[in-house]
Amino acid sequence: MKYNRTYNFSAGPATMPEPVLEEIRDEMMNYRGSGMCVMEMSHRSKVFQQIIDEAEQDLRDLMGIPDNYKVMFIQGGATLQFAMVPMNLMKNGVACYVETGAWSKKAIAEAKKYGDVHVVASSKDRNFSYIPDCSDLDIPENADYVYICENETIHGVTWPKLPNTKGHVLVSDQSSMFLSRPCNVSDYGLIYAGVQKNVGPAGMVVVIMREDLIREDLDPKVPLYMSYKTHADNGSMYNTPNCWAIYCCGKVFKYLKSIGGLEAMEKLNIEKAQVIYDFLDSSKLFKGTVDKEFRSLMNVPFVTGDADMDAKVVAATKAAGYDNLKGHKSVGGLRASIYNAMPKEGVEALVEFLKKFEAENA
Ligand SMILES: *Cc1c(COP(=O)(O)O)cnc(C)c1O
């Protein structure tokens, strides 16, 4: 392997495409004749303005974002959105949330500070191993929005189809599946994604928001930074943005375009996930923790059913050069995060290793 890098199965911050890292390296000391690194550059400079404009345009091209949606680059990670969403979107003070795992639970807890939260469906009864039926939810007439976490990073579940919101605005946390497959943006009122899972360095979130949902009449006590209007009106530069993350994400957007866009990415992601799920379905030692139709293409939790054996596998994988496979404590076992940038060879090599481990430990 070039550079002696490890196959990194971290859930986030996570592996990046090597050609992107190489480009960043090549531009490190002197970005395209500017005489400086992007890290050192004024965010008000022409050079940086071009970087952010191109990043936004490339993202619009990739996802086919309609003109009536704003794209914003905001700091505070996905976690800040747990509060920003209710602060900005709760006009009537009522919202519906679907509880599907650790990240939606956190969003629910935060939203409860700001209004009346209806948990309209939950998969808590089986430790979040499936997505509940959301075809006929009990949504109050005055609900301001319906909220989902579209891929639960810890529990490894994803939505095969979106909930029936009965005409209400849909808000989605796409952090751990952002740009992993095509997305019909007009199905949503607001999409957000912390970029360190599937796109770039930590510390930034991309928000894609339908323009008419941006409010002028927020409580004046809402911090300026936490009003979407502030970011939308100032091209994500009301204050100093995370210039470095915007630059790196922009490179990833261009890279995705160059390999054929989100259709091509989805095809590859399906192939990659198939390699590991086929193995788990045939293994006697390991088993996946999620019901088949809700399995994530990005985060694959699996267990042996014996905590000591789990720990032994994690240690063995690490020693063999497969890093960050320890599962989250709420699920136990192992978790392989196989985001866009994880090559298929990495998944194949891991599966070969697990097969060998199984044979030796039968
Ligand atoms: C990681 C993650 C978050 C939190 O992201 P931060 O950037 O650490 O705030 C929120 N939602 C999902 C689905 C995540 O995977």
Image (cartoon, rainbow, N blue to C red):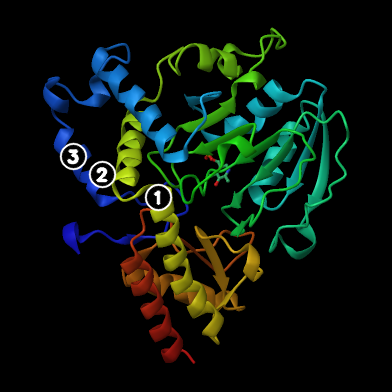
Residue where numbered disc 1 is placed: 14
Q: Quadrant of ligand 1?
A: top right
Residue 334 vertical placement versus 38 (above, below): below
Specify whether 127 is left or right of 302: right
**Distance from Cα at disc 2 to Cα at disc 3:** 9 Å
The amino acid on which the numbered mark 1 sits, given as a three-letter code, is Ala
Residue 196 in which image quadrant? top left
**Residue 108 spot, x, y in % from top left:** 73, 39
Residue located at (30% from left, 50% from top): 259
Of residues 231 and 83, the one drawn nearer to the viewer in this rendering? 231
On the question of residue 41 being in view, the answer is yes
Asked if the residues shown at circle 3 and circle 1 are in contact, with their CB atoms under 8 angstroms apart, the answer is no
Q: Earlier in the sequence, mark 3 or mark 1?
A: 1
**Distance from Cα at disc 1 to Cα at disc 2:** 14 Å
**Residue 130 spot, x, y in % from top left:** 70, 62
Residue where numbered disc 2 is placed: 20
Residue located at (51% from left, 24% from top): 67
On the question of residue 195 being in view, the answer is no
Q: Earlier in the sequence, mark 2 or mark 3?
A: 2
Specify whether 292 is left or right of 266: right
Q: Is mark 3 within 8 Å of ligand 1?
A: no
Residue 66 vertical placement versus 196 (above, below): above
**Residue 316 spot, x, y in % from top left:** 39, 75
Q: Earlier in the sequence, mark 1 or mark 2?
A: 1
Residue where numbered disc 3 is placed: 25
